[in-house]
Amino acid sequence: MDVNYVGENLLPGKIGQFFVVLSFVAALLSFISYFFATQNPTEKSWKTLGRVGFWLNTLSVVVIGSVLFYIIYNHLFEYHYAFAHSDEQLPTHYIISSFWEGQEGSFWLWMFWQNVLGVVLVWRAKSWESPVMTFVMLCQTFLASMLLGVEVFGSRIGSSPFILLRDALEAPIFFDPNYLSMIRPRGLNALLQNYWMVIHPPTLFLGFASMIVPFAYAAAGLWQRRYREWLNPGLPWALFAVMILGTGIIMGSFWAYEALNFGGFWAWDPVENVSIIPWFTLIAAVHVILAFKHSGHGFFTATLLSLVSFVLVIYASYLTRSGILGETSVHSFTSLGMSGQLILFNLTFLVIMIGLLVWRRKEMPSTQKEEDIYSREFWMFIGALVLTVACVQMIATTSIPVFNTLFGTKVAPPIDPIAHFNQFQGAFAVVILLVTGFTQFLKYKKTEPKRFWAATLATLLVALLLSAAVVYFTKLYTNLMYILITFTSIYCILVNGRVLADAIQGKWKLTGSAVSHIGFALLVLGALIAAATNEVISINESGYIGVKNFGKEGDKFTDPGENLFLTEGEPVQMGDYKITYVGDSVAPPNVYYHIKYEKIDEESGKVKEQFVLSPFAQNNPDMGGLIGTPATKHYLTHDIYTLITAASLDSQAPANDGEKTGYEEYDEPATYEVNIGDTLRYRNGVFVIEGINRNAHLQNLPLAPEDVIVGLKIKVISAEGKEFPVEPIYLLKSGTVYDFNKDVVEQGLRFRFTNIYPQRDKLEVMVYQKPLPEKKWIVFKAIKFPYINFFWSGTIIMTIGFLMAIYRRVKEARSSSRSL
Amino acid sequence: MKKSSIILIVIIAIAIAMIMVIYTDSSTYSTFTEAKEKKTELYVVGVLNKEKELFYDPVKDANHFSFYMYDNDSTECKVVFNGSKPQDIERSEQIVLTGKMEGDVFRATKILMKCPSKYNQDEVEVIETTAYLDYK
């Protein structure tokens, strides 16, 4: 069927699609050429061809990105990607976030980073270029295929970001040539409209992408039989990948803390787990590589861990992108029907890993000599193994949906994943931190046991005293695991602080590791204290009757709830703070709710401290209603986190200014027969019938002498003590009764003087009341996170440590390649 | 025997023990009927009964939300959640509850929903289907 659609701009899509195909072909060409360049190093033309392919691929990736940006920026909603991930209201800086909301964009991001890394490798890798780039370009080929969106033998390969809306979806509206003017784009997920979402995904993907490099070096080392050599250039890359991925993960955690409403920074969500697993294995790899370099032990483990880290990256990508996590994860991508492709990608790299290891198993360097227990490499090895076992635990629990699919079982993940993971990972953390501590006192190869024990025990004692103080002040003593983690992380900080102090006096080489170990220990300590001792301070006790708890403590089903109800202008005492909901303001599409916190000195009654937090919420019917974004007050020692969980509807609805007349705004009237001097009640006070005014008059109304006009003097006294005089009028004109109502607008009252009964000496008054205007209210939750700054500062310190270590290892790799 | 092999064996033993613990820690998706029998905390999967009222009155109690749900055996049960109403529950096409049975009421501690809304790839929202808008 041919329809001449109006207003479509098809050229960008055609250009984009061309480069999508080109990027795939170029990557494939480059992969094949680099493969043959490695096999026939004498033939220079293979390597040149490989580079040509690489540059063509880089060019294509840049063009794809630019075209996609052009489409989103210019709101070309005829393209499905723009339609599904952006709308016209989206501020420009969030266009970047909408770029990677979809899978296609995030694959693009991965490819882009791999190109950037490729440029560095082509430029600097020298003799390693061909074998290393073979693996990089193989990965790039797989990634490029994810964007193809081409049908081969009836099945679609990849999903193109340039597919047209009317091709992507089937709907009757596409029979209309004017469909473009009638569709409403879906827009960007409100939760992603956060500045951290502009920076977190690129960092995370740079981390994921850079993990291909240690893989490629390790694989190339096995392939080319350059066993010992690959470790030198591979180590700084592994450190780089660990640093960037770690930063990216914690950025995600910070985003979750700042923008998500689950009230925390880590939830052991499958998506989080699968990104931390390769991080752990690569950290383990880094340590075993170092151990091998100094002692000759553990080549196989070092290589295996480097290789498996990237295989796990692809596995992570499979889990989050195939939709298999389904009901176990809140935030994974939905399936685009590419799981087959992703599985192939995963299996290919797994087979390469196993194949190479099996193929070279007899040639790998190994020593027959046994490592000494009092040696650094032995405990580095143990530490790496513990990290690996920690990963096995995470993989096992996270992969439950995969096992269910594979074996047709119906096992559900643990009821309380946070407790489940904390229990395991807490134990691992204790061991890791302890090993990271005392191993610093050991030297490579052999240490004098006496000196080791002297140094270890001295520090242990100091750590014991310090952690006792910390445990006491942070009230962590209720849980043995908390105490152990606190103790071991303080111990780790102390030992590494000592190493750092020594290093500053001369052994500069060790600063990088000491600094990153301190950062890691701080991170664990901060996470522990913040997660273990955070308290919900918005406990709603008022809404409960004492009986409701049945005196049972700690029963989560009957404990007072965590949400507090606040009415505008009515202060409530919440812990140390007096809080008032002072009002809201609208900045479409968000409504900001301003909550004033005041700390009042009990004796003087003076306000010691006050601040206003403005958490906001977006009422997005497409996203299912109110989506809250927290606001957090940061102190050095703790944070106060506040989130709106419900709000009165009218602050979300546009103000209704339409003038209404008549009585429809009022409730059913009450009719009273009264005498002078009567006092009657209304909702917000009383009114007194004061007397009759026989001299009442109405403007513009000529009166005949036989007409009767009487006013009824009423005084309204509100509950606040305000008085409002009002005088409705009764008129008998030419035998017909009229009455003229009078309003007290401030109190929402309307009075009618409707009848006079002279025989009974009664006056009839009708009182209309407006329903009391519903006050604006909010329901919110506030959580206090103590010492969370340790968590963030630990991350920063750790990153600095990694940077120092990279600097040192790059220098080392250069000098060793010169001496070779 | 080398020290490293002993350690390796110990580690593998720990790993296996751990995995077994994980699977005892895990549970199964059950139904309201089973929940009534077991009285322990478990998962129940089902769909919201959209015909019955979803009750949430924050003015009275901001931490009480109740609704009716059909489990996978189409048994209906009243569910009470001690918290505020999840934002998009009306639109959910599947609900996974964590909690336990108390009498005839299921006390939920966690509600996880699967929503079609935004992520439904096959849905086009149309501003106006009947009227033809003038194109600029």
Image (cartoon, coloured by chain):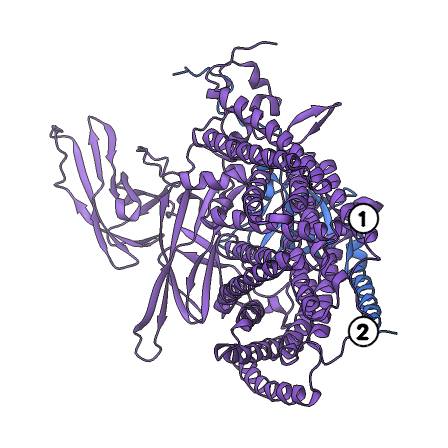
Chain colours: A purple, B blue
Residue A524: x and y in percent read 58, 69
Secondary structure at numbered mark 1: helix
- For mark 1, name the chain: A
Work out whether residue B85 or residue A441 is closer to the camera in this orientation and state it: A441
Chain of the residue under label 2: A
Could you tell me if residue A653 is visible in this image?
Answer: no
Q: Which residue is mark 2?
A: A369
Report the Cα–Cα distance between label 1 and label 2.
27 Å
x, y percentage for residue A625? 51, 42
Q: Which mark is residue A355?
A: 1
Residue B5 vs A311, above or below: the answer is below
Quarter that holds the N terminus of chain A: top right
> Which quadrant holds residue A20?
top right
For image coordinates 70% across by 34% down, the residue present is A337
**Place of residue A80 in the rendered image (x, y in percent of width and height, measured from the top left):** 55, 28
Q: Quadrant of the C terminus of chain A?
A: bottom right
Of residues A392 and A690, which is closer to you in this image?
Answer: A392
Rendered residue at 64%/43% (across/down): A133
Q: Secondary structure at mark 2?
A: loop
Q: Residue at x 63, y 81 (%)?
A: A441
The three-letter amino acid code for the residue at tag 2 is Lys
Quarter occupied by residue A423: bottom right
Circle 1: is it few (<14), some (14-19), or many (20+) Cα within 10 Å?
few
Q: Is residue A381 above or below residue B97?
A: below
Few, some or many C-alpha atoms within 10 Å of disc 2 (few <14, some 14-19, many ≥20)? few
